[in-house]
Amino acid sequence: MNSSLRNQFLIPIVAMLLLICAAVTAVSWTIATRTSRTATETRLRNLLQLCAVSKFPLTEPVLDQIGEFSRCKIRRVSQVAVIDKLFTTEELDGNFDAFAIRLDRNENPSETTTSNFLLALSDPKERFERTTAAFWLPMATGVLSTLAFCAIALGIANRMVKRLETLETQVNRIAGGEYQSVAVDARSVDSIASLARSINSMALQLEKAKEEIANSERSRLIHMLANGMAHQLRNSLAGAVLLLQTVLKRTTDGPTHEIHYALGQIQLAEESIRRLLTISRHGPAAQEQSLSVQEIHQQIEAYTRSMAEHHHIDLQLHCCKVDQLRRISSGNSVISSVLNLVINAIEAASQLTCQQEGLSQGGFERRGTVQCHYLWDSQTCLHRWLIRDNGPGPDPAICHKMLEPFVTSKPEGIGLGLPTTALLAKQLGGALQWQRRGEWTEFEFTIRDA
């Protein structure tokens, strides 16, 4: 590309400059020749006219002496081919520039042959030297100008070729899947700069399209896995529930509390399965219930209180009294999503409790805490849940992609909890966001409910 583009720039420019140089040379030579001829003609005419009006006799010795002073030869002749005009003649075994005028006086009346013309002969080499001297200045100017223009054209061509090579490299990177932008001078307003900005815009759009395609593929894979896993687990859990309910009916004095707790854990698993089925159907659940915020918090606490007590976690669910009776039509989805976030927070806070146990030999210098706050945002008409824990925080290696599928730091995890929660929030007109603030990890779950 380098030589091809450079040739495309330089060949037309150099050819044009050479033609201009040739034209300047021809015109300069023509003008120099004409100027030198005119000067020679004027010099000879003036010399002959001076001789014609002089008072001294125009004898041959006198004319020879005048010719020596003027570097030419002067003769009196009886006839000439041309008068009052420069011409070329052969005299004295050589070619000469000649100029003749009519002579109106007769110096020697006794002569039978009257010489009526004065003829001046000049060496044409002198005229050629004057022509050459007049020619070299415009010729040198034209050649030097051509060389200067060629150097300037080469510099401009190299600069443009380098810019185009940068764009070619960028396009090749884009073709290879690398969507990096090239630096463009903000002051540049030419076509190449505009093309570079267009290529940068194209790279940005392609990168966004690549991310959207990747997200779409991940979502499709989640839907497929969720559908297959949910149906298999649901059948197994249904048998376990029937068996525990049968044992509960037959038991009168046995450990019914433990059985109720087991049923609650199975119900929690069924909620997770229901969430997977909701995701797999690409839309709202078919059996959504309209629940108040208070009812949602009560169910979340019922599912997680035993787990929090087991891990010595201080679980706090907060809601203003004015918001407790606020109804949410997609109650089941909200329970599944917030429940997943609370369980993750309990697991994270339990790591702090374990660390403190090792440090204080059974005492808890700093107890793990999980807080779940509900807030109605009247300005944006969004339901907000802020779930925070004072655990050690997520693994820095996965912080930037925690909401992507199959990303997890848990050895037994598969990395679908947060992605499914984020998808549910998006389907309900909200979002799932997180941040690490001081010693707290905060997740914000928002939905837009009718």
Image: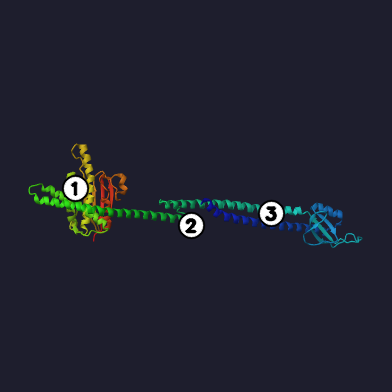
Q: Provide the secondary structure element on which disc 2 rests.
A: helix
Mark 3: few/some/many CA within 10 Å (<14, 14-19, 20+): many
Tell me if label 2 and label 1 are in contact, CB under 8 Å: no
Of all residues, the one furthest to the right in this rendering is: 110
The amino acid at mark 1 is: Leu
Seen in the image, is 397 located left or right of residue 155? left
Q: Is residue 216 visible?
A: yes
Q: Nearer the viewer, mark 1 or mark 3?
A: 1
Residue at (39% x, 55% y) in the render:
206
Residue 53 screen position, x and y as percent: 82, 60
Residue 110, labelled with which disc? none
Q: Nearer the viewer, residue 374 or 172?
A: 172
Q: Is residue 302 visible?
A: no
Q: Provide the secondary structure element on which disc 3 rests.
A: helix
Mark 2: few/some/many CA within 10 Å (<14, 14-19, 20+): few
Tally of numbered discs? 3
The amino acid at mark 2 is: Ser
**Which residue is label 2 attached to?**
191
Q: Nearer the viewer, residue 351 or 151?
A: 351
Residue 315, labelled with which disc? 1
Seen in the image, is 350 located left or right of residue 133? left
Q: How many angstroms separate mark 1 from mark 3 (CA)? A: 103 Å
Q: How is the image coloured?
A: rainbow
**Which residue is label 3 attached to?**
135
Q: Quadrant of the C terminus?
A: bottom left
Q: Earlier in the sequence, mark 1 or mark 3?
A: 3
Q: How many angstroms separate mark 2 from mark 1 (CA)? A: 63 Å
Q: Earlier in the sequence, mark 2 or mark 1?
A: 2
Residue at (69% x, 58% y) in the render:
30
Seen in the image, is 79 located left or right of residue 201? right
Residue 200 screen position, x and y as percent: 42, 54
